[in-house]
Image (cartoon, helix red, strand yellow):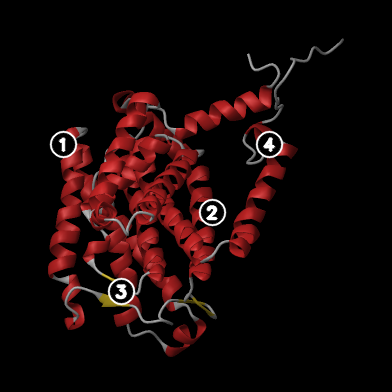
Amino acid sequence: MSTTWLPCGKYHETYTQDHAWWQTTFIRGKMIALFAVLFVGIPLLADDYGLSICNNVGYTVLGALGVQLLIGYCGQITLGHAAFLAVGAYTSTLMILEFPWPQALLDWGLAYPISILVAAVVAGIWSVFFGLPSAKVKGFYLILTTMAAQFITVDFIITQYVSQIGGRGQAFSLPVGTIKVGPWVIDSDLKVYFMMLVLSIFLIAVMVNLLRSRVGRAWVAIRDNDISASVMGINVFGYKLLAFFVAGFIGGIAGAFWISNLAAISPEHFPWSWSLWLVGVILIGGVGSIHGTVFGSIFMVVVIEALQLVIMQFVDTSWGSRLFMDFLFIKEAAFGLVICAFMIFEPNGIAYRWWQAKNYFNLWPFSY
């Protein structure tokens, strides 16, 4: 009996093949090349400014992953995610500066790694607290409850109380040598870059595997139709709270990571506009796509940096100097314009175009 083959494409015969991370030799080659660029090419070729941009991209990816989980995969709209990054950052900072660590843990450089885990758990639990209203409300009303997380956490608790611990006023200073992982002191952009890479790859891998599990399928069912999900026997409220915990957990890690890039931490590092920014990142990159989280982060950071570089070329002129002084407002205006443009011309985000280009390349010349 002869076998008839379709003209193009990659076909799998087992479940394992269908769910493999890297399904073809070509994809494995692409990923090896990507890791070579990330771990070898960029550290060798990029200067401190380039590394700082990469670190900003990584921080945005880490922050937006939780937003992508809540909005893109579970259908729970959030506009207060910066609060959970702040909880993670302050928990880690307070543990490093105030906790009476045994000298052995300090010598082994374990204080900061342990503080990251504790910060993630605390941020996850705090996120669950503000996820409780999701049992009764959704949509616009849930937006208001998540906005309350921002104002209660950052503007009230952290600003008025946490920031006053130790009589420091508003900012916690992080002297050089404070952030240490094992024998390595994180005291340069290059070391921050490598830590960012490890955390980003690890959390993306965890997220992807979680979404492919029973839990991930339950979240998608709730996003598509929570009533139908409940009829099928899914504990809708329980899975919503789990989504809030995981999103807060990832946000806590993002905040704890970011203190390694700061000389001092204050509430001004976690404004409400940052929550809006993270939502805009996934709208631009693509809602319901891990690729979209990465693409959106790269796009927004690079666009804003490019805009700043253009303005700096004219800083010697009177109007250029004025634009540079007002760059914060220009940045917000550019962000709004980009969001509007994507909603009108590319509502599915950059990830959708990537998916189209990838399929066209894989199926050429039989792209029908």
Q: Residue tagged by mark 3?
A: 264
Name the spot of residue 102 as percent of width and height, x first: 41, 87
Local crowd size for mark 2, using a 10 Å CA cut-off: few (<14), some (14–19), many (≥20): few
Local crowd size for mark 1, using a 10 Å CA cut-off: few (<14), some (14–19), many (≥20): some
The image quadrant that residue 315 belongs to is bottom left
Name the spot of residue 288 as percent of width and height, x first: 42, 34
Residue in the foreground of this view, choosing between 245 and 7: 7
- The mark nearer the N terminus, 2 or 3, is 2
Q: Residue tagged by mark 4?
A: 23
Q: CA distance from mark 2 to mark 3?
A: 26 Å
Identified by mark 1, the residue type is: Tyr
Identified by mark 3, the residue type is: Ala
> In the rendered structure, are the residues bearing label 2 and label 4 in contact, judged by CB atoms less than 8 Å apart?
no
Identified by mark 2, the residue type is: Ile
Question: Which residue lies most toward the right here?
Answer: 1
Q: CA distance from mark 2 to mark 1?
A: 34 Å
Secondary element type, mark 1: helix
Q: In percent of the image, x 30 and y 69: which residue is there?
A: 91
Q: Is residue 53 above or below residue 238?
A: below
- The mark nearer the N terminus, 2 or 1, is 1
Identified by mark 4, the residue type is: Gln
Name the spot of residue 270 as percent of width and height, x first: 26, 59
Q: Residue tagged by mark 2?
A: 201
Describe residue 67's horizontal placement relative to residue 145 as left or right. Answer: right
Local crowd size for mark 4, using a 10 Å CA cut-off: few (<14), some (14–19), many (≥20): some
Q: Residue tagged by mark 1?
A: 141
Q: In percent of the image, x 12 and y 68: which residue is there?
A: 160
Q: Is residue 15 visible?
A: yes
Secondary element type, mark 4: loop
Q: Is residue 233 visible?
A: no
Q: CA distance from mark 3 to mark 1?
A: 35 Å
